[in-house]
Amino acid sequence: MNRRFALPFLLSAPALLLFVGVVLVPLAMTVILSFNDWSMNRGIVPVFTWKNWREVFGDGYYYGIFFRTLRTAALVTLITAVFGAPEAYVLNRMRKPWKGLFLVVVLAPLLISVVARTLGWALLFGGETGLINKSMLGLGLIAAPIPFMFTETGVIIALSHVLIPFMVLAVWAALQRLDPQVENAARSLGAAPAVALYRVVLPQIMPGLLSGAIIVFALAASAFATPAIIGGRRLKVASTLAYDEFLNTLDWPLGATVATLLLIALVAIIVGANRLIERRYAQVFQ
Amino acid sequence: MSRNGPLALAYHALFIAFILAPILIVCWVAFTPLGYLSIPTREFSLRWFRAIADYPEFVTAFRSSLALAAISSTVAIGLSVPAALAVARHRFPGREAMTALFLSPLMIPNVVLGVAFLRFFTQAGLGGTFTGLVLSHVVIVFPFALRLVLASAAGMDRAIEHAAISLGASDGAVFRRVTLPLILPGVASGWLLAFITSFDEVTMTVFVATPATMTLPVRMFLYIQDNIDPLVTSVSAVVIVLTALVMLLIEWLYGLERLLAGGGRLETP
């Protein structure tokens, strides 16, 4: 009996040891670091101070960066929902070989290096290879090239591309649980296609859409490579700010404060949103 | 079931073009015969692919990424198989908390993990070492390995194990000859997903890697930050093609849709 009780602990002990040692301890050390002092000459000074936290909360510079981070993430979430959900719906209505094939085409970019995908956008946005501006100018849609590189617009477009597969996947999963006959029933009872879509299909895929939105928001708010490459050094977001503090300015305590704040904000938003969704759609999860 | 109308199909075509455009342009520009970024139309050249060989930074980074991904995904799978069996088959105090801890790297932003690892490894004397890099990658790929092994362990028919035991097989023999073969598809695809995740990871690694232990995505990222030239597009094209080959392997082994639906998030952009 004793052996049976100990078995699961023995089996998971190696992984547990690693996670306590290499996840919990470093995270605790980061939080502690955010309360340490730092100066150009002395480096990290191991004393307790609120200095970094006061600086991050008191200075409009940091405030602006966090606001930009959240705004970008919110817009990316909205764009991926508006464009990803219809695509999942269209995919779901396709026939056998095409359905699977295009689902793979939409999801496969998730496995391709983010740096390579972002490089693609950098190429499409500007210079000799800037096909977007070239074709829009050629078609006479715009009079002057739109600046995409080093702008929030560019970051939002590239991030939406990087993250939209998650939204398609989440809505797709919700559509799999949906009985197609329900929509047909609405149609046969005289509902127009748009009405059936809006009043029958949409409410049922809402939980999937919202859980996709949480994933996209969390990943957009903590995105690093895409805002760093497309946004450049000036257009900072929380994660590129933390990077600069750690590897350029070398003010580790301040960088640790930014990272801790990002973690707290994201965990609060994710947990809060999850609670809301579960309460609102309790019947769907039962 | 009703079919898609022409409007829906037109939307679909635009969507697929949007998804593929940035990936295709990288591969296209990589074939430019010119010395600067341009879209080749009449002449295509392999000069920028040959040029990769002249840049040892990319070649060593590629080797180091391969070694790192192979080692860390193997260690992660080795740790996740017993942990997944514990979670899937036993009810014990702390089970929920432990599972949450194991999956936590999916929820913690990679930049936060990078900061935490940098601080920890520097203090622990592992700063800038390959060991530190492996430990950090084991942690971030572990949730992917765990999820896929868990899925196959939970779906397994335990009556087969009981039959083996009743026929006198020892615990070790049951594991080696019954359990492991049955969860092998999950283990293999978990390893592949872990491998790709590790190979592509940049956000966390940019904090932990040093010039001596530089991985390929970090090298590409730092290169792009300085300037974008055809060389980095040909390196990216190689990475894209290799990833596509691994994807075909996964599709054949396990099914890409199943893998991604169960794998959740992959890497931070």
Image (tube, coloured by chain):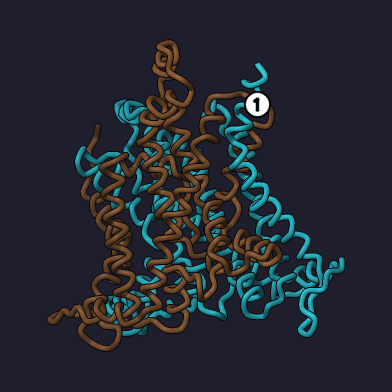
Chain colours: A cyan, B brown
Residue B97: image location, x then y, percent: 66, 36
Residue in view at x 24 percent, y 35 percent: B2
| Figure quadrant of the C terminus of chain A | top right
Asked if residue B93 is positioned above or below residue B215 in the image, the reply reads: above
Residue B196: image location, x then y, percent: 40, 55
Residue in view at x 32 percent, y 26 percent: A181
Q: Camera-side residue: A184 or B52?
A: B52
Question: Can you tell which quarter of the image residue A31 is in?
Answer: bottom right
Residue B132: image location, x then y, percent: 58, 61
Residue in view at x 38 percent, y 81 percent: B228
Residue in view at x 62 percent, y 20 percent: A4
Residue B212: image location, x then y, percent: 51, 74
Q: Is residue B43 left or right of residue B60?
A: left
User: Tag 1: residue type?
Assistant: Ala
Residue extending farthest to the left is: B42
Residue on which disc 1 sits: A6
